[in-house]
Image: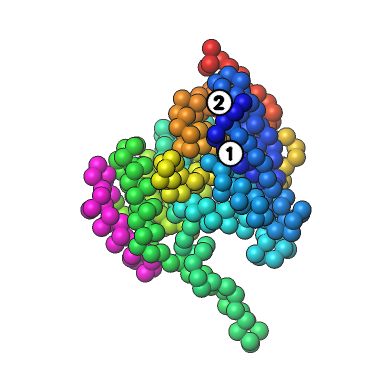
Amino acid sequence: MASNRKVMVLPGDGIGNEVMAANMKLIDWLAKHRSLGFDLSEGLVGGAAYDVHGVPLTEETLADSMASDAVLFGAVGTPKYDGVPFDVRPEAGLLRLRKEMDLFANLRPAMVFPALVEASTLKPEVVSGLDIMILRELCGGSYFAEPRGIDDLGDGTKRGYDTNAYTTPEIQRIGRVGMDLARKRNGRLTSVEKANVMHSGVLWREVMTQLHAAEGDGVELSHMYADNCAMQLVRNPKQFDVIVTDNLFGDLLSDCAAMLTGSLGMLPSASLGTPDPETGLPKAMYEPVHGSAPDIAGQGLANPLAQFLSFAMMLRYSFDQADEADLVETAVNNALQSKRTGDIMAPGCEQTGTDGMTQAVLDEMDRLAR
């Protein structure tokens, strides 16, 4: 089937291979039942690339990813690579993709499906109906800013340091994405930093305040310190709509929010760049939050639903296929009524593995398409 929708598929390591193989079945279903095709390429990344090429991301794979309309990503890293040099660790491949593609906006939804309310460690009344979006700046801050390193002080001790630095334009562009997301949701944006103790936080708050005054029509802006935000996420998460924050705090807070939903295995993400002037579409990468889970890799136990939901985000944000995205998300919700993988198992449900969960979603897609 001819298609100009170019998608680079990077399964990666661990369960990334299993959940990506499951995702291919959904892609095949859409080609058969909705005449929706993709021009697919596949490459190695992370430990899989290191084993073959000695680097976690080759120049060829990077170029193919840059030339694609979207990257569908699995997961990278296992303990097998703990001893490799820092600059060729599996995660370095992912970080380079994000940096070279300029994927500065990381969207991490945290929503509780009705069937999974009891899976959360919080009380049902706290998480029932939860639907928030954490927007993490992904190309700056302490993961990329210089100087950073480890210095030998010459007296038997060392000094490790990282710089948390942001410029006005970097804050403005993520702030604009946050306001756009808020307008499409419930109109509330919470900007999170540590302006009480960090100069980067002072600038972040200052720029966000000025940006909102100039461009924030229809958006209610509030500010919150990152430590308080972590507390509020477990105290009263439904007070939030969209949270926008820097790279480090976004990493921490999004994982905190993930567990409100009951399992990391349920959460997708989208990483978006600046929209192309001709197509209006951003460079983009879509990946589940759960990581490579090496303890269950190769056993057929992995929960594929976060991968499916990441794929649904790709349909929505990269290809304007909202109906198909809704179909996948509804099928996931319906399948959860009776089937569960071990990480989200509940009384009254049938426990299954990757294949069984995938088939349950495909069955629901069949039913919904009638």
Determine the residue positioned at 66% across, 52% down. Answer: 60
Q: Quick one: 138 or 119, which is closer to the camera?
A: 138
How many residues crowd mark 1 within 10 Å: few (<14), some (14–19), many (20+)? many
The answer, for residue 250, to whether it is visible in the render is no
In this figure, which residue is indicated by the disc labeled 1? 7
Q: Which of the numbered marks, if any, corresponds to residue 36?
A: 2
Residue type marked 2: Leu
Residue 233 as seen in the image, left or right of residue 203: right
Boundaries of the magenta span: 196-221
Report which quarter residue 4 is drawn in. top right
Does residue 106 sit above or below 367 in this rendering? Answer: below
- Give residue 170's position: percent from left, percent from top: 39, 59
Q: How is the image coloured?
A: rainbow
Determine the residue positioned at 57% across, 77% down. Answer: 159
Q: Quick one: 229 or 298, which is closer to the camera?
A: 298
Determine the residue positioned at 57% across, 30% down. Answer: 3
Marks 2 and 1, how far apart at CA: 13 Å
